[in-house]
């Protein structure tokens, strides 16, 4: 796991200039490499086929150095094609890798009380596709070594460089390793490159040149493996979890050694597209802070996309187009056909239309547009006026429905000229959820100038209407709604609840960490108390609770008395990760007469690693009372076609699909918290003179 930050532009320029000068100079002879017994006889570089530049770069790095015989290291180097995470077949279920591991495995390598307090050791974690691909790539290297003729092989990833003084350190370390392991027939595993796991690596038998590793080493970017060691690793498979984590469990049987200091480093002058499965857990535990989050895809496209599907129960193609970063509108098929002018107007807002009803003239004009792309599922009846055999092959494609091995990504991305994602091709949302329908009332759109202030507060995202549409929610005329059904989970919160237990952890951008002792129960319900603390990584401690289980559509309500005070946010919300979707009620302590309603939407099936968005699509609602003065009943009524926010049984805000986001479609957990945002934009600077502060929640319920 490599969490090193990418260098700044100036640092990148300086680093690349320095490396260009260095690789132009001859390097030293490294006597550990050579063809004699007891020498490292070969180098394997793991490199993706789509990264030829990295292969050229690492060859320049290796060409500087010579073996014991005086020949360049490149003469004993060969390339091993890496397994690509974008290839669904390559990262499908395999006997080599078990994609499920536990938080306890992470804690074995890098103990951390904060992570252990937040999650049980048996908490399951699923590897990302990138982690599976990396593990399988190293397994292929081990197979090559075990079946080869060389006693010792250096395995490198393709983003490495040799640090100053590396040749001498390698020679000293290799001599010490041979001497130390003489009775065992030589070393089986020697790390040239590693990262000490938070300074917690367990080292024994330490000398000037190397040490024996017990546990606590991250990275597998540079290591020497013997044929015997490779065979032992293959016998111990499957690899369970990220491969550098799993290797820590093999240290004892391999007698793993590591140089006293790493001599091979990974480059930081370009961003990695790797995704790490444990990061959300580290963020929730407050070990890392991801800041404002990643930006959504910014794809270059040839033009508008028109697609027609076969009418399956799940809308796979619409979801796939959305995952590629296109703003997608789907149709039911019973709408009035659009004429050319109307189609032109719709395409000013949306990048892709799925099953759009078009009059033949509009369809002919769209097909004739040299920028447009036409997509058809193989079982889709061609719309009237479209002759698929006459479509230009570079601007059209036919997709096989239900392709479970990502073949549809190849066809789709080939037609659109986009990079294939690492995520699996989606099954899509059930058609009856109508996820990408455009149901927003046109009366809620105004000029961009009229709502410029609100536009600045929204994410620039393909899953939010563009700022040019001037979205502004209209007032709701106090409609009453009936309870949707019987409770499926409820708690008075006057005592600890098994349905809504207290949480430990935090999240990026929060100055407070959550602790169970900061949730206090009494006759007024659960009091979430925020106060200053000394000696912690975060300056404040507060309370939070959440439902044990996730829920689909329904009514989520609680009686809440928000916390007063500048810099404090009281939250009651639905949330999920992978993909991130969220429906919020929030109260800012400095402005207690207003309530914030918000929606975050990311596309994908359950497990899709898409978590874009920092501001979402917020809207402030005037309450007409002070939310910190007394309890009021607040509710989120989440249905497939709309979300309504209620106060004391009356709708105060309502949104439908594309108003301005699609409606979240995956199950979420119910949360409540009191937190202190790092950014002063939302709630201003915290006023410590008002601490401790408390928000109260009682009579929490979920109704299906």
Image (cartoon, grey):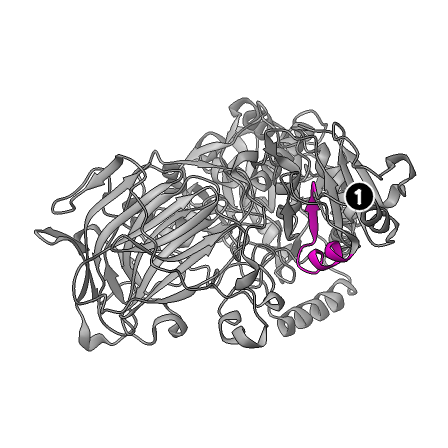
User: Is residue 342 magenta-colored?
Assistant: yes
Residue at (76% x, 36% y) in the render:
376
Q: Is residue 410 left or right of residue 437?
A: right
Q: Quadrant of residue 599?
A: bottom left
Residue at (70% x, 60% y) in the render:
348
Residue 293, horizontal then vertical, whole percent: 50, 59
Q: Is residue 547 left or right of residue 462?
A: left
The residue to which callout 1 is attached is 374
Q: Where are the magenta residues, as a range?
A: 341-355
Residue 449, horizontal then vertical, whole percent: 58, 77
Residue at (77% x, 51% y) in the render:
339
User: Is residue 473 magenta-colored?
Assistant: no
Q: Quadrant of the C terminus?
A: top left
In the image, 147 versus 172, the foreground residue is 147
Whether residue 256 is situated above or below residue 623 in the rendered picture: above
Label 1 SS: strand
The answer to whether residue 561 is seen in the rendering is yes
Residue 655, horizontal then vertical, whole percent: 46, 54
Q: Residue furthest right?
A: 390
Q: Residue furthest left?
A: 523
In the image, 498 versus 268, the foreground residue is 498
Residue at (42% x, 65% y) in the render:
619
Whether residue 688 is situated above or below residue 518 in the rendered picture: below
Whether residue 440 is situated above or below residue 689 in the rendered picture: above
In the image, 653 versus 418, the foreground residue is 653
The answer to whether residue 79 is seen in the rendering is no
In the image, 551 versus 149, the foreground residue is 551
Residue 585, horizontal then vertical, whole percent: 34, 57
Q: Is residue 360 left or right of residue 323?
A: right
Count the labels in the image: 1
Tag 1: Cα neighbours inside 10 Å, few (<14), some, or many (≥20)?
A: many
């Amino acid at each position: 796991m490599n969490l090193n930050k990418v260098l700044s532009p100036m640092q990148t320029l300086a680093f690349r200039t320095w490396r260009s000068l260095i690789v132009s100079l001859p390097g030293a002879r490294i006597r550990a490499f050579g063809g004699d017994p007891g020498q490292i006889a070969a180098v394997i570089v793991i490199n993706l086929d789509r990264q030829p530049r990295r292969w050229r770069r690492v060859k320049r790095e290796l060409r500087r150095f010579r073996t014991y015989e005086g020949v360049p290291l490149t003469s004993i180097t060969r390339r091993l094609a890496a397994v690509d995470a974008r290839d669904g077949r390559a990262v499908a279920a395999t006997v080599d890798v078990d994609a499920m591991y536990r938080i306890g495995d992470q804690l074995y390598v890098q103990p951390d009380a904060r992570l252990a307090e937040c999650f049980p050791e048996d908490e399951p974690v699923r590897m990302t596709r990138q982690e599976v691909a990396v593990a399988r790539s190293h397994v292929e290297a081990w197979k090559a070594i075990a079946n080869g003729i060389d006693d010792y092989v250096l395995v490198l990833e393709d983003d490495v460089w040799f640090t100053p003084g590396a040749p001498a350190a390698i020679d000293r370390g290799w001599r010490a390793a041979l001497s130390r392991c003489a009775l065992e027939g030589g070393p089986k595993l020697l790390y040239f490159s590693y990262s000490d796991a938070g300074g917690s690596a367990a080292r024994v038998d330490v000398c000037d040149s190397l040490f024996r590793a017990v546990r606590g080493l991250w990275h597998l970017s540079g290591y020497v493996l013997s044929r015997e060691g490779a065979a032992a690793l293959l016998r111990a498979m499957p690899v369970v979890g990220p491969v550098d984590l799993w290797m820590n469990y093999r240290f004892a049987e391999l007698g793993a050694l590591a140089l006293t200091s790493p001599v091979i480093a990974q480059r930081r002058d370009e961003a990695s597209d790797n995704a790490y499965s444990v990061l959300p857990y580290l963020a929730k535990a407050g070990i890392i802070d991801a800041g404002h989050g990643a930006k959504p895809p910014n794809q270059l496209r040839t033009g508008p996309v028109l697609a027609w599907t076969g009418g399956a129960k799940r809308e796979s193609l619409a979801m796939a187009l959305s995952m590629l970063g296109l703003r997608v509108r789907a149709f039911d098929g019973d709408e009035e056909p659009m004429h050319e002018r109307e189609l032109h107007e719709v395409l000013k807002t949306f990048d892709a239309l799925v099953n759009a009803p078009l009059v033949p003239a509009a369809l002919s004009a769209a097909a004739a547009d040299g920028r447009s792309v036409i997509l058809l599922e193989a079982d889709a009846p061609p719309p009237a006026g479209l002759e698929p055999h006459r479509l230009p092959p570079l601007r059209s494609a036919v997709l096989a429905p239900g392709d479970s091995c990502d073949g549809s990504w190849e066809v789709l991305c080939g037609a659109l000229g986009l990079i294939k994602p690492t995520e699996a091709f989606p099954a899509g949302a059930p058609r009856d959820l109508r996820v990408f329908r455009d149901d927003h009332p046109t009366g809620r759109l105004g000029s961009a100038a009229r709502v410029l202030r609100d536009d600045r507060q929204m994410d620039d995202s393909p899953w939010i209407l563009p700022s040019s549409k001037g979205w502004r929610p209209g007032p709701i005329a106090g409609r009453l709604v009936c309870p949707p059904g019987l409770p499926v989970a409820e708690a008075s919160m006057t005592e600890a609840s098994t349905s809504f237990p207290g949480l430990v952890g935090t999240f990026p951008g929060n100055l407070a960490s959550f602790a169970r002792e900061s949730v206090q129960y009494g006759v007024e319900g659960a009091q979430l108390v925020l106060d200053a603390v000394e000696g912690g990584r975060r300056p404040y401690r507060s309370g939070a609770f959440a439902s044990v289980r996730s829920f689909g559509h329904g009514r989520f309500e609680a009686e809440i008395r928000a916390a007063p005070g500048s810099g404090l946010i009281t939250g009651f919300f639905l949330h999920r990760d992978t993909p991130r979707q969220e429906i919020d009620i929030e109260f800012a302590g400095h402005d207690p007469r207003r309530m914030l309603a918000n929606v975050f939407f990311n596309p994908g099936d359950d497990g899709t690693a898409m978590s874009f968005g920092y501001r979402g699509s917020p809207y402030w609602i005037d309450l007409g009372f002070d939310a910190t003065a007394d309890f009021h009943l607040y509710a989120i009524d989440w249905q497939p076609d709309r979300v309504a926010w209620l106060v004391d049984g009356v709708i105060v805000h309502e949104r439908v699909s594309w108003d301005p986001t699609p409606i979240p479609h995956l199950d979420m957990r119910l949360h409540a918290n009191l937190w202190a945002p790092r950014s002063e934009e939302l709630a201003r600077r915290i006023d410590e003179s008002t601490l401790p502060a408390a928000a109260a929640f009682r009579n929490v319920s979920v109704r299906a």
